[in-house]
Image: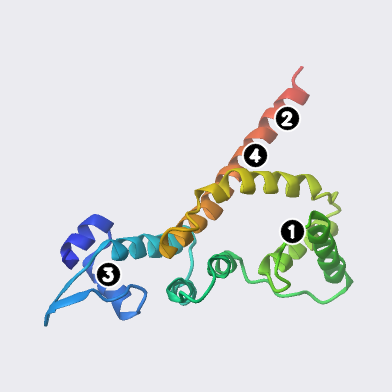
């Protein structure tokens, strides 16, 4: 297909596609003339991935480039490729000075060990959760994450990860992971707030 058809099928404007080509986010098409190239389904998949990372994941172009590089590195195992996308979605967290941070980080590490989860030592989610625990402790909130961890494990293992085509095109696997991580997360948060409203009504009804 020509770039005009690629634009029509993907919903991405031609100038934006050309920008992605210049930035090497999108691989070049098959050159058929000096000013003409042909594109295929792999370009459509890549554009879907870029849109997922940009519009749903809210990632900057620099982070998208890292994810695309992982997708294109066929020597990189699928688990590590997906990890690159996962880590890109995590907010940047700087360890905080003081005892509260170390207590929270030790809590996170023990929780992971107790659950038997295989989480890399450098995973940004360790610090992300530790930062949340610091705030909870400072505000005097009760901290018991075990029920939340169990619910997360069940949802991920029985629902979310079944949507990821691990053995399909690498672009499609990352796209599914990003969409699932962000959108299932939003849906779960909305459902939890609705459950809180319903339970409040039940407990306080006269």
- Mark 1 Cα within 10 Å, few/some/many (few <14, many 20+)? few
- SS at badge 2: helix
Q: Are marks 3 and 2 in contact (CB under 8 Å)?
A: no
Instruction: State the mark number for residue 25.
Output: none
Query: Residue at horizontal 48%, vertical 71%?
Result: 67
Instruction: Give the mark, 3 or 4, whose residue is nearer the N terminus.
Output: 3
Instruction: Give the mark, 4 or 1, whose residue is nearer the N terminus.
Output: 1
Query: Residue at horizontal 73%, vertical 68%?
Result: 127
Q: Residue furthest top?
A: 206
The residues bearing labels 3 and 1 have C-alpha atoms spaced at a distance of 40 Å
Instruction: Give the mark, 2 or 1, whose residue is nearer the N terminus.
Output: 1
Badge 4 is on which residue? 193
Badge 2 is on which residue? 200
**Looking at the image, which is closer to me, 55 or 156?**
156
Q: Could you tell me which quadrant the C terminus lies in?
A: top right
User: Percent x, y for residue 60?
Assistant: 47, 71
**Looking at the image, which is closer to me, 2 or 131?**
2
Which-is-in-front pick, marks 4 and 1? 1
Instruction: Give the mark, 3 or 1, whose residue is nearer the N terminus.
Output: 3
Q: Is residue 106 above or below residue 73?
A: above
Badge 1 is on which residue? 117
User: Percent x, y for residue 190?
Assistant: 59, 41
Badge 3 is on which residue? 17
């Amino acid at each position: 297909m020509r770039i005009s058809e690629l634009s029509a099928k993907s919903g991405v404007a031609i100038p934006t596609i050309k920008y992605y080509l210049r930035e090497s986010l999108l691989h070049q098409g098959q050159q058929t003339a000096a000013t003409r190239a042909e594109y295929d389904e792999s370009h459509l998949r890549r554009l879907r991935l870029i849109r997922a990372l940009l519009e749903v994941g809210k990632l900057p172009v620099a982070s998208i480039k890292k994810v695309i590089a992982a997708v294109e590195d066929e020597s990189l195992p699928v688990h590590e490729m997906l990890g690159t996308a996962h880590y890109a979605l995590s907010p940047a967290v700087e360890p905080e000075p003081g005892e509260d941070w170390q207590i929270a980080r030790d809590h996170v590490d023990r929780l992971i060990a107790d659950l038997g989860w295989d989480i890399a030592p450098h995973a940004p989610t360790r610090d992300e959760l530790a930062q949340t625990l610091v705030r909870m402790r400072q505000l005097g909130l009760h901290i018991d994450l075990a029920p939340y961890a169990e619910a997360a494990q069940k949802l991920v293992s029985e629902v979310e990860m079944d949507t990821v085509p691990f053995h399909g095109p690498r672009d499609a696997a990352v796209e599914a992971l990003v969409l699932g991580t962000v959108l299932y997360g939003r849906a779960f948060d909305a459902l939890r707030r609705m459950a809180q409203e319903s339970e409040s009504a039940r407990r306080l009804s006269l």
